[in-house]
Amino acid sequence: MSPIILSSLDGRPIFGLKGEPMSALNLSQRDITAYDGTPVRLVYDQEADILEIFFGTNELATGIELTDHIVLRLNQQTKRAVSLLLLDFSILTERTEYGPRSYPLTNLHDLPEDFRTLVLQLVTSMPVRQFLKVSHFQASPTESVPLTYVEAQPTEVVSG
């Protein structure tokens, strides 16, 4: 893993929220290939415990908060997943005695139906589904609650 040095186009350091140069951040990155052949870049900030998984080329994207800790960035025009942002990554990938920690996708209900359909299509398709799994809980015969959990595989960038 090599640290990532962040600077502006003219070479000046980029500063974070507290005024410290962002080049001082301890970021690790690893490039891998998803099972479907998509180039993937894993970027992990150990201090903040944030993993961002980039799918192909990074581009302008809309962030959709799937849960309080999982954000899907997507390009609405190309209908492509740009990245998956995992906040509190070590907690998201912790295993319990019953298996992986699952989180309800309750924020999906707030999206317009066509947008919700696109988000569900992206999270259940490669390359996103290699890292984020989706299932559901049958709360009653008429109510189904979509759930998600993070596949533990990306931990290689953390421990690598």
Image (cartoon, grey):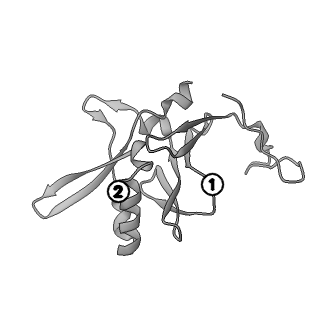
Q: Residue furthest left?
A: 141
Q: Residue at x 55, y 29 (%)?
A: 158
Residue 105, disc? 2
CB atoms at circles 2 and 1 under 8 Å apart? no
Between tags 2 and 1, which lies in front?
Answer: 1
Mark 2: few, some, or many residues within 10 Å (few <14, many ≥20)?
many
> In screen coordinates, is 134 left or right of 35?
left
Q: Quadrant of residue 22?
A: top right
Q: Amino acid at mark 2?
A: Leu
Q: Residue at x 41, y 58 (%)?
A: 122
Residue in the foreground of this view, choosing between 138 and 39: 39
The answer to whether residue 7 shows anywhere in this view is yes
Q: Is residue 114 above or below residue 63?
A: below
Report helix, strand or loop for mark 1.
loop
> In screen coordinates, is 116 left or right of 42?
left
Q: Amino acid at mark 1?
A: Asn
Q: Is residue 90 above or below residue 20?
A: above
Q: Is residue 123 above or below residue 78?
A: above
Q: Position of residue 138 (x, y in %)?
A: 16, 54
Residue 98, disc? none
Q: Quadrant of residue 151?
A: top left
Q: Position of residue 13 (x, y in %)?
A: 85, 46
Q: Residue furthest front?
A: 37
Of marks 2 and 1, which one's residue comes earlier in the chain?
Answer: 1
> In screen coordinates, is 31 left or right of 143?
right
Quickly name the residue at label 1.
Answer: 58
Q: Residue at x 20, y 59 (%)?
A: 144
Q: Quadrant of the N terminus?
A: top right
